[in-house]
Image: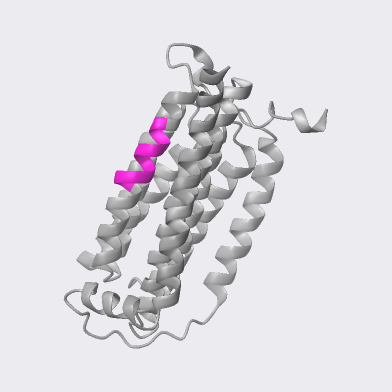
Amino acid sequence: MHITLTHYVIVSALLFSLGLFAVLSRRNAILVLMGIELILNSANINFIAFSRFGGSDMGGQAVAIFVIILAAAEAAVALAIVLNIYQRFHTVNVDDINKLRE
Amino acid sequence: MTLIDVIFWFFAAVTLGSAAVVVFSRNIIYSAFALLFTFFGVAGFYVLLGADFIAITQLLIYVGGILVLLVFGVMLTNKVVSVDIKSGTLNAGVAMVVVSLTAGTIAGIFYATEWKTAPAEMLQPTTAGELGTMMMTSYLLPFEVASVVLLVALIGAAMVSRRDRSKQEAA
């Protein structure tokens, strides 16, 4: 069986699901960030697969570069926030940070 | 089964297997190191798809930047010597049901759709030149906006993580 577009997008769907599971269920905020990175990577695989199999249009690759740029910015800001939370609450468990609710 | 197929299945196994370790591992250090292999596998997909510049960018930025940042975050927010480094789960059962439904739906849609693909043509030897031209012509505004976003985000991140310490010194 030859490798087609369907193979790539199904791999990306599974990667997205794994990332979604990390975001929904893990308690550590850094693991939630890792899940977000997995989701962004799966989106990037989709962009490049469609760019390759849709007549080698380079637009998909250009968008993928912007996704990588925004992922870098997101990781920097999110980790700065996580470090601040750790300094204040001495934990990064997302279920322990509920001071606003009390 | 041609060589390309074997390489595809190899990268798919590496990517999904290590992503599963990232998600299900109890030890956050193992997760961070498994993420390295996930990023490498995704870079392999980019090479297979003829996107050499994106593959190199993936290695430079994800492996060289974001992963190191995440490992620093792990080291700074966990007591490495204590058992605190273990990370539990929240509502794992509900999340598993939601994720299974999502995965089934997305994969089913992808599988059932008749994709209209263009006939495979000769790949260019490198895509960097054409991407550079596109960045300076049709994607010029997003390019400039992205550079400003990156500058603002990095200055903001530095501000956010510094502010607390200077307050403590002043007090």
Residue sticking out furthest to the top: B82
Magenta residues, start to end: B63-72
Question: At x 63% / y 38%, what residue is drawn?
Answer: A25
| Place of residue A65 in the rendered image (x, y in percent of width and height, measured from the top left) | 38, 65
| Place of residue A11 in the rendered image (x, y in percent of width and height, measured from the top left) | 44, 60
Locate the N terminus of chain B and report the quarter of the image it occupies. bottom left
Is A20 located above or below residue A91 in the figure?
Answer: below
Is B115 located above or below residue B106 in the figure?
Answer: below
Question: At x 29% / y 45%, what residue is drawn?
Answer: B64
| Place of residue B84 in the rendered image (x, y in percent of width and height, measured from the top left) | 53, 17
Would you say residue B80 sits in the magenta stretch? no
> Is there any visible trace of residue A2 in the rendered image?
yes
> Is there any visible trace of residue B24 in the rendered image?
no
Is A38 located above or below residue B54 in the figure?
Answer: above
| Place of residue B55 in the rendered image (x, y in percent of width and height, measured from the top left) | 28, 60
Viewer-closest of A37 and A90: A90
Locate the C terminus of chain B and report the quarter of the image it occupies. top right
Answer left or right for B83 relative to B17. Answer: right
Question: At x 37% / y 50%, what residue is drawn?
Answer: B15
Is B135 located above or below residue A82 in the figure?
Answer: below
Question: At x 20% / y 65%, what residue is drawn?
Answer: B3
Residue sticking out furthest to the right: A102
